[in-house]
Image (cartoon, helix red, strand yellow):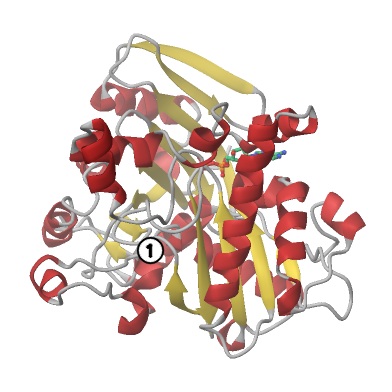
Amino acid sequence: MNTTPSNILVINCGSSSIKFAVINPASEQALITGIAERLGEAGAQLVWRGSQQKNTTALETADHDLAMQAILTLLAEQQLADTLIAIGHRVVHGGEAFTHSTLINKAVKQAIADCQSLAPLHNPANLLGITITEKYFSQLPQVAVFDTAFHQTMPAKAYLYAIPYRFYKEKSVRRYGFHGTSYRYVAETACQQLGIDYQHSQLLCAHLGNGCSAVAVSNGQAVDTTMGLTPLEGLVMGTRSGNLDPNLFSFLADEYGYSLEDTSRILNKESGLLGLSELSNDMRTLEEAANQGNQQAQLAISVFCYQLAKTLGGLATALPRLDGLVFTGGIGENSSFVRQQVIKQLAILGFTLDEQANQQHGNKQGVITQPGSTCALVVKTDEELMIARDTASLVNQAPATPNH
Ligand code: ADP
């Protein structure tokens, strides 16, 4: 076991779970990964994997604090607790305050709290994760890595909504974009795979998981993206509607008597693939059903793919040329059918699919298009590694003392 103090603990704290990983930034290997899940419920449990098989420990009704104690005990048992040099936290919303990852201090925690109105489900949980880890790892510096930060390079013409300007000035209402940590990782990796210079590259990236978004990256900087003030805007997702007519709120109120909360819940939790298919939010399940002739599953997938292709076509407008379209996330990495549909729909951008490479999720370079075609490729995302890289680099620049 590695006993040199050189590893990073990566924490992704959600409202009912704590995902964690210990990563060695030199080898970029994860030494342990796991999740404490269903926190606050009867079935709370700690699931983790080291170099061997998956292990599960019951946590009974543990809350976040007890779960963190269990993670600390586990890391001590695995002789990893003493190898840590810093902790990196995923933080969903950094508003306009954070354009990069940052060492956490009191002012940073306050700024994360100030962004709570923009991400009421995520930021309080992220902050709780920071507070608890400070308690149990008080000697270690902590770093916040924001989902929104990468998109802060977008120009005003891309991030402003055409609504009265005072909402932006007074309440910071604008498009922020998410999945930024994933995009930084896959855009850089795609350039390595293609042998092109990231700082002079023109890319479109689509992160397609339960949440879905896309971004245009010009010379290593985000110039436009699909998610907005919240992650609801943009593409069709597992349970989120993506773009629609905002008048739907008043229409559903008139027709069904729905409150703002009702419609908001429907658009966030009951729409997207789930709403259209009336079967599942899970693309794998829908593909199986579609193959067996389920017409609503077929319809849901076709809406998903068409809207994605249409949006990518629009995003391409933000770039002077296109060096590559990157697919990532659970669907982007694994669904050859979705990629095929999207690439076919985007023929106008000069794509010609290599069917065999697509079935294999890419050739050696991840490429799924034919020679001479505009390039599309598959890159497996690794947000935890990106958080570990940022954390290691900030800690190596700064005095190794906690600054909270
Ligand atoms: P999250 O956003 O929660 O991290 P993931 O990135 O793991 O989610 O993506 C989950 C999605 O990926 C689900 O819709 C799942 O069905 C889909 N997916 C995973 N594997 C496959 C596959 N082999 N074929 C099609 N879809 C898949």
Residue ID at (41%, 33%) = 270
- Compared with residue 101, is residue 282 higher up or lower down, i.e. above or below? above
In the visual, does 119 lie left or right of 179?
left
Residue drawn at point x = 80 percent, y = 66 percent: 365
Viewer-nearest residue: 263 or 13: 263
**How packed is label 1: few (under 14 Cα within 10 Å), some, or many (20 or more)?**
many
How many labels sit on residues?
A: 1
Observer-nearest of 329 and 21: 329
- On the image, which quarter does residue 152 sit in? bottom left
- Residue under circle 1? 177
**Secondary structure state at the residue bearing disc 1:** loop
What's the residue at 36%, 41% (across, down)? 267
The location of residue 46, given as percent across then percent down, is 44, 21
Classify 389 as above or below 259.
below
Question: Residue 342 in the image: x percent, y percent?
Answer: 70, 60
Percent coordinates x, y for residue 77 in the rendering: 46, 24
Quadrant in which residue 178 is drawn: bottom left
Q: Is residue 17 visible?
A: yes
Which residue is nearer to you in this view: 197 or 304? 304
Residue 75 place in picture, x, y as percent: 44, 31
* Relative to 221, 296 lies left or right: right
Residue at the (84%, 65%) spot, across then down:
353
